[in-house]
Amino acid sequence: MTTSDQTFDFLALPDILVTSPSSKDTKTIPIHFVKTAQFEKLASKLSSFHQKQIENAGWTAQDSSFVTLIDENGDTESLYVGYEKSVGIFTICAATEKVKSGEYFLESTNLKPEDLENACIGWLLAHYRFNHFKQKKSEEKLLIIPKKLNTTRIESTARAAYLVRNLINLPPNALGPKTLANCVVTLAENFDAMYRITEDKELLEENLPLIYAVGDGSERRPCLAELAWGNPNHPHITLVGKGVCFDTGGYDIKPSSGMLLMKKDMGGAAMAMATALMIMSAKLPVYLRLLVPCVENSVSGHAYRPSDILTSRSGQTVEIGNTDAEGRLVLADCLTMACEESPDLLIDFATLTGAAHYAVGYDIGAVYSNNEKLGHDIQKLSLQLDDPLWNLPLWQNYKKDILSPIADINNSGAGNPAGSITAALFLQHFVTPETTWVHIDERAWQNAPQPGRSQGGKEMGVRTIFTLIEQRYAKKTVKKK
């Protein structure tokens, strides 16, 4: 990949899950999962030779810990992984990353199917490496999986994570607005979904002026990618993802240190696409709509300026208090567009503010909703799934900080340290009161590697939102009113 826009196989998974050994003579290594509370019972059944190895390793089956046992020839004989209550998708990751190459299989006698599926997902996540620009590839370890598992869940969950990580990790010279839009097209084609790309001046013709204004400063022209899938008589779910492929800050330019990670500013688009992938893979009985505004926020003679007043799709005027608050502008037109179809549930994903990072740190995404119970339900569900989101308030008293004396609203809440809240209030301004809406403000970046979570692009909230939609609508086939 060079500086020109082009696509690549961002959906590919490594071929490391198999249903049988590569040959009859291959030595396969069992993976045993041991509940922490049952460690003593397990240890008492092992040979003194293996008990000594466990003692030397100091292994007591703590959650996500592991020990590799060898035979008398020094060859790997078995792998033991500890867990506390259930096997999560990250439980096996540390072991996967550390064990030697070989062919392993899951000893499944004491595990539920969901535990086994989570182990398979973790095996895939632990193998993720962004090596598209490297000649030397990472070694792979095969996992022989039981034939009766739900491979759709395994593959779609892992593929969603790979999608997010791949797209965020791509350098900005390889992922421009058109490339990102083409990725939506590829996703649509994989699931026989309908799609549409609205480009450049067509955005003005289709009354999407804020998307056009933000992207007009770049030679790589702005566009809106749309996907539609499912039965229109089913509940309508609309996902919106911020697709700012690189953010200089515009005329309110970022310092060099603040620009280093701005290739991740399309992380919201990647999250929305990944959630759509999981919904379509599971064939949920919903009508899905995906909106991805694809732009680059650049500095040029065509770029919008601080103090400009722009008219949005809704007709509301926006005073530009800061050109580095561009994400909320492109989302505003999309939220207006989404509400025109009266969706049953509207969710947007965005790397919207640094303030969210300061509020909840780098592990957690901030979630807002105009339905207070829904916001709390999402937080609770996310903690159960080890996909943490934290519900923050749409504190209406702060809306005064984004009002303008010369326009309907200002895109900057300058002076209010609760920048994530004021940004969410700006978005709410473009959501109709009767629409159930969720906004997720997330960092989308893993600062330091953890098991199953390599440094770089990070999926946040995808599994939570998919599970929320699955629980709400999986069995509902009632026609939308």
Image: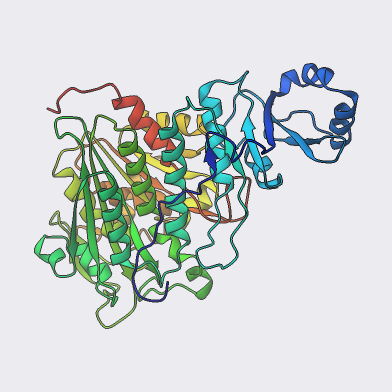
In this view, the residue in front, 96 or 226, is 96
Image position of 80 (left or right of 176): right
Q: Residue at x 39, y 45 (%)?
A: 440
Residue farthest front in this picture = 24
Image position of 48 (left or right of 31): right
Q: How is the image coloured?
A: rainbow
Label count reads: 0
Q: Is residue 234 visible?
A: yes
| Residue 277 locus on image (x, y percent) | 34, 43
| Residue 34 locus on image (x, y percent) | 70, 24
Residue farthest left in this picture = 205
Task: Say which quarter of the image contains residue 284.
Answer: top left
Image position of 243 (left or right of 108): left
Image position of 129 (left or right of 285): right
| Residue 40 locus on image (x, y percent) | 80, 19
In this view, the residue in front, 354 or 110, is 110
| Residue 159 locus on image (x, y percent) | 43, 45
- The answer to whether 60 is drawn above or below residue 449 in the figure is above
Q: Quadrant of the C terminus?
A: top left
Q: Quadrant of the N terminus?
A: bottom left
Task: Say which quarter of the image contains residue 206.
Answer: bottom left
Q: Residue at x 29, y 47 (%)?
A: 190
Q: Residue at x 72, y 35 (%)?
A: 65
Q: Residue at x 68, y 47 (%)?
A: 101
Q: Is residue 391 visible?
A: no
